[in-house]
Amino acid sequence: MVRGEDGDNDDRSLDDNQKMPESQPMWAEWLLGAAGRGLTPFVPGFVWQSYPGNWVKDLGVDYHGNPEERKGEPDANKGESLEEQLRRSAPADLASLAAQLAEERDAFVARTVLAAKLPGWEGCSLSGTKVASLKAGICRVSNRGAAANADVVLKLLGEDSESSARIAAAHRALGDAGVATALLASGPDWTIEALGTGRAGAYEPANKKNMCAQNAGLAARLHAAPTAWWPPHKDALRALLPALLQEPDSSPLYTLAAFAAQKGNRAAPVFADARERRDLASLMAALPRPEGEAANRVVNVHGDLWDGNILAGGGGALVVTDLESAAVCGAVQDLAFTPEPEMIEAYLRGVSGRDPSAEEVAALLFEARLANHIHFEVLRGVFMINGNRGSTPPAEPAGGFIEHARELAAVADAVRGSAKLRRRVLDIKAQAWCYWDAEVLAREVEASR
């Protein structure tokens, strides 16, 4: 139930002149989550890696957790880092503030959905609108007066207008192509999409082969969709990250830069520091590049294509959601999220219309696993995005990965030149690839000689 400004239940519908509400600060979403987690030691890292500096400044600290002077309060929090301030704050106080912020957020979300005048929501009132938080910045919205199956999802995208425009453009294009949830409305910092449903048994080992086949079919359809939405947003990312000017269109940098920009990580050294930009260019020159036509096809790439971002749409067909990392680049960047033989075989069958050979499957599987390692263990660290090892800010300097990249490139050359060695390397469990050290593969190369 949403209350009106006077505190009473508001049964009014928003009229045609109703303006969209003011944006809700996203740091409030973080604080709601922080209170719910009881302020674990990992909270500061979550702030740094997930939200932009100006949102965190609302708490009286700068992006890296150093105290800032608030206007009118020159001594506030002096000498305390963000972590110290959070640990000093009483959880009860945060819980109270979180409850207040939740009510304000729900009112903002409800008014935004009603003002969008969605099909099936005609005549709906504010008091009949129910808002349920799914996770930070994402809410399910329903109304007792709406048509059946008219529930929607509103997502708060952040304050970077270009990133929001890119996400909305990708979502609209892919929704029109039937490979993303339908985009119903969008604003400068939010989107409203149709509600999808999860797949039963998606995480059960017994369903692995079937799930891989389904994911592969979705990836093939996604990669076949039109890419006309991309050019202006490609130019914007290149302006933000000049290293992209030297990169091929298939570069893995596009999805990482897109995600980091949307999350507000423009303060990351690769965006702001000239030396880090040069080191990033050197790192990209040293990293092994994908080989083969299937890996390098320039297509729509979701950029985070794991089971949690795959839903069943209204007609039952699988669709994607959460397009923060969406870009047009090399197809292998999506395959890297499920680098399993069943996935690769089904994908090749889907894009070619024929059964692939064992060698074709092995070749693309190696490229997918290599891309997996580069994405999670190298580039995510550089772009301050929390990876599987839970890296914490500040970002790891790009220059620190260059020697690793050279070793990895040497190993990749050796593996690509020997079918026997490739089979040996592919016997390493897929789950271990995120934690690869180039030395592990180097030992495999030496053992095969």
Image (tube, rainbow, N blue to C red):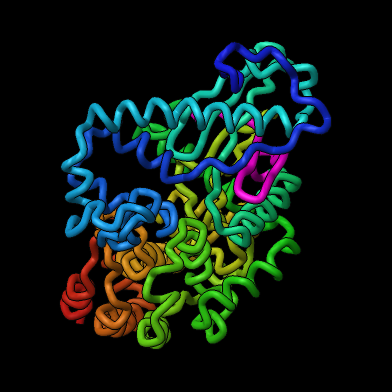
In this rendering, is residue 241 above or below 432?
Answer: below
Q: Nearer the viewer, residue 80 or 160?
A: 80
In the picture provided, is 62 more to the left or to the right than 364? Answer: left
79 left or right of 155 in image: left
Count of numbered badges drawn on the protein: 0
* Quadrant of res 64: bottom left
User: In the rendered view, would you say 3 is above or below 297?
Assistant: above
Residue 12 percent location from the top left of the image? 72, 16
Can you say whether 33 is above or below 228 in the image? above
Q: Whole-percent x and y of residue 277? A: 41, 83
- Measuring from the top left, give residue 151's x and y in whole percent: 64, 23
Q: Nearer the viewer, residue 2 or 343?
A: 2
Image quadrant holding the C terminus, namely bottom left
Query: Start and end of the magenta stretch?
Result: 179-199
* Residue 186 can be seen in this image: yes
Residue that appears at 66% across and 11% down: 144
